[in-house]
């Protein structure tokens, strides 16, 4: 689903016409029509639009993270997985593009412990590159493992894993929402923020970074 689909879906649920919603948001009906037609990907009044549609701006622009992968509960009868009930697998970044399709638990050689509140389809991912290294504050290097949760909605300031559809690659970034626009930012100041587009889809939120000695 795109932002156009989500706007139309929510507007229909609330029984609003384009004219009624546009008036509430403070934009013209023509502007709203461009959003619903897919011509406008980053509405300037995203916050107002989300408020009137009774949803969060993150969902409106990005959708639920959980929609990119299946719930792993369907695999609980796998004996190998049950043997790692308080652990989650360490996987390669290419696998994280669709963890639901990499569900041969016996093939996962390394597992790490997680807290009791961690979902069953969370996983550890090895960090690559230096884009999340910083000289001050939080700094996450290639030596870190990060715990990815695909069952939660991303909010401003969250560390996230996203898929770049055109290159079939994944990226580890910080989600930044500023004046209605959504960006993917690095902790390393040498990297410029990237504006979110339909080329990106969420894989999960990073809940923990662990450095193994």
Image: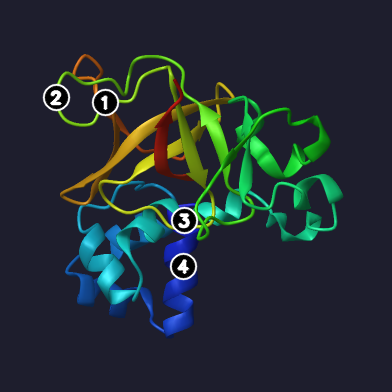
- Image side of residue 54 versus residue 200, left or right: left
* Pointer 3 local density, CA inside 10 Å: few below 14, some 14–19, many at least 20: many
Nearest to viewer (mark 4 / mark 1): 1
Secondary structure of residue under mark 4: helix
- Give the distance between the C-alpha atoms of the residues marked 2 and 1, in whole angstroms: 7 Å
Residue at the disc numbered 4: 8
As displayed, is residue 17 above or below residue 110?
below
Q: Is residue 104 visible?
A: no
Q: Which mark is residue 95?
A: none
Q: For the view shown, which residue lies furthest in the front direction?
A: 213
- How far is mark 3 from mark 4, CA to CA? 13 Å
Residue 190, quarter of picture: top left
Mark 2, residue position: 136
Q: Are marks 4 and 1 in contact (CB under 8 Å)?
A: no
Q: Pinpoint residue 121: horizontal percent, then vertical percent.
A: 63, 51
Mark with earlier residue (4, 2): 4
Front-lying residue, 140 or 169: 140
Q: Looking at the image, which residue is at 38% across and 82% down? A: 16
Residue ID at (36%, 46%): 41
- 10 Å neighbourhood of mark 2: few (<14), some, or many (≥20)? few
Q: Are marks 2 and 1 in contact (CB under 8 Å)?
A: yes
The picture places residue 206, in percent across and down from the top left corner, at 42, 42
């Amino acid at each position: 689903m795109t932002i156009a689909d989500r706007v139309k879906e929510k507007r229909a649920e609330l029984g609003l016409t384009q004219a009624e919603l546009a008036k509430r948001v403070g934009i013209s009906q023509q502007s709203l029509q461009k959003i619903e037609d897919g011509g406008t990907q980053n509405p300037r009044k995203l916050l107002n639009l989300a408020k009137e549609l009774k949803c969060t701006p993150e969902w409106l622009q990005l959708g639920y993270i959980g929609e990119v992968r299946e719930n792993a509960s369907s695999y609980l009868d796998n004996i190998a997985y049950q043997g790692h009930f308080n652990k989650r697998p360490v996987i390669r970044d290419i696998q994280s593009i669709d963890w639901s399709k990499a569900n041969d638990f016996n093939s996962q050689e390394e597992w790490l412990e997680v807290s009791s509140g961690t979902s069953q389809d969370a996983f550890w991912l090895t960090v690559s590159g230096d884009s999340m290294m910083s000289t001050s504050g939080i700094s996450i290097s290639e030596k870190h493992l990060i715990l990815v949760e695909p069952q939660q909605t991303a909010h401003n300031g969250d560390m996230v894993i996203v898929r770049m559809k055109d290159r079939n690659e994944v990226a580890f970034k910080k989600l930044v929402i500023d004046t209605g626009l959504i960006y993917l930012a690095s902790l390393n100041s040498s990297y410029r923020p990237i504006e979110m587009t339909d080329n990106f889809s969420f894989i999960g939120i990073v809940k923990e970074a662990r450095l193994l000695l």
